[in-house]
Image: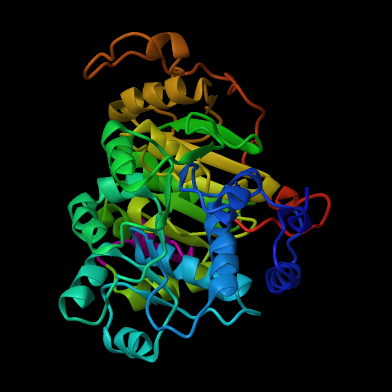
Amino acid sequence: MTFNNLQLIEPILRALQAEGYTNPTPIQAQAIPYVLQGQDLLGCAQTGTGKTAAFTIPILQLLQGRKSPASGIKALILTPTRELAIQIGESFQAYGKYTNIRHTVIFGGVSQHPQTDALRRGIDVLIATPGRLLDLMGQGFINLKKVEFFVLDEADRMLDMGFIHDIKKIIPQLPQQRQSLFFSATMPAEIQKLADTILKNPVKVEVTPVSSTAEKVEQAVFMVEKSDKRHLLRHLLVTSDIGRVLVFTRTKHGADRVAKDLNRAEIQAEAIHGNKSQNARQRALSNFKAGTTRVLVATDIAARGIDVEELSHVINFELPNEPETYVHRIGRTGRAGNVGTALSFCDLDERPYLRDIQKLIRKELAVHTDHPYVSTAAAPVTLAAAAKPAQANSNTGNKPQNGQRSKSRSGFWRNKNSNSRKGTGQKPNPAS
């Protein structure tokens, strides 16, 4: 299937062609026709599947077809982070370049004046984070009474970040008669309940279940003492062919510590998290995309919206305590058909997290022991063990004997950069 099969108008097809896109991703192929038919939609899809274009493209087409001189915001896209809001704005800019649809992006952490100036000039599409939206609504800059399309993106992350109460304040300000699109990577009970209050007879589109990981992402784990993780990270970056790499930590302070330690070792690194100013976050991301910065150290929330083409490696410096988060993290690599590698560091206290991850993805991660910092608890965490209750403070696990090999081939993390591009040489499809 190509985008030509989706009954898209010429200006949008021309924009997609200019971007080098010809074939829709599965969620785009499924969702776009339903949205064009005016149906509410419940999309269950993780990042990297192309969901941003799945709602951006049909909204642009519907607005272009019914555009009238009447002023007012016609579409509202609500998203949890500044990075995601900016990314969605870039999508509207790219796919709508040959339409006359006007959009702007608003978020906190920066001066509101450029944002309010854009609102005064008049827009059709507003992409917003909840806090700044409520703030500007309270100041009288924003009226949502003419909204025809409402998109709630990354709903599960909204829940994690505590934005559900803000969303519940925003919903009553929208017209009852509207088309609503709801996207979430996971569907916990509270998110499903929220979807039920927003959507009317929705069509459900589901791709890449959260328990699955990208087929082309190779995964491995290093059993290592907590105090040795920073040494192991430097060792891998110095002795391997890893190029640009996204490193995940659980906390903001942890991200800063890792970046500072790498810079002391003359490995160019920057941290990105919620305590950084918006300008600092954008500068770090731009440097990473340009290749000026080799290592970007991020927390999970800050990483939402990071979309770097041909990112070959992700390293979990700390394992997440929620297994679904692991799937989201490694989804930053191996995107749009590219080859990727996800490496994870696991200390003794994190072994229960590893059990939960392997149980979710139904796969045992290959264990590497061919490095200088092997932990005394280096025995594999098996799926059989995952079925049993985790032993608190367990010290089980044998130190590998001399000459013991890891489960996967030696040098697993080497020479990946040469394989990071598609063999066809085609540009990947638009992805969220």
Up the image or down, 339 lies above or below 104; here it is above
Numbered label tally:
0
Whole-percent x and y of residue 23? 74, 53
Relative side of 240 to 397, left or right: right
The one of 309 and 113 positioned closer to us in this rendering: 113
Relative side of 347 to 242, left or right: left
Up the image or down, 216 lies above or below 76; here it is above
The colour scheme used here is rainbow
Magenta-highlighted residues: 258-275
**Residue 261 sits inside the magenta stretch:** yes
Whole-percent x and y of residue 117? 33, 90
The one of 428 and 11 positioned closer to us in this rendering: 11
Q: Is residue 393 visible to the viewer in this orientation of the structure?
A: yes
Whole-percent x and y of residue 292? 55, 72
**Residue 410 sits inside the magenta stretch:** no
Could you tell me which residue is drawn at 53 percent across and 70 percent down?
63
Picture quadrant of residue 114? bottom left
Could you tell me which residue is drawn at 46 percent across and 13 percent down?
383
Relative side of 339 to 252, left or right: right
Q: Is residue 376 visible to the viewer in this orientation of the structure?
A: no
Up the image or down, 244 lies above or below 363; here it is below
Up the image or down, 347 lies above or below 122; here it is above
Whole-percent x and y of residue 205? 53, 39
Could you tell me which residue is drawn at 48 percent across and 66 percent down?
88
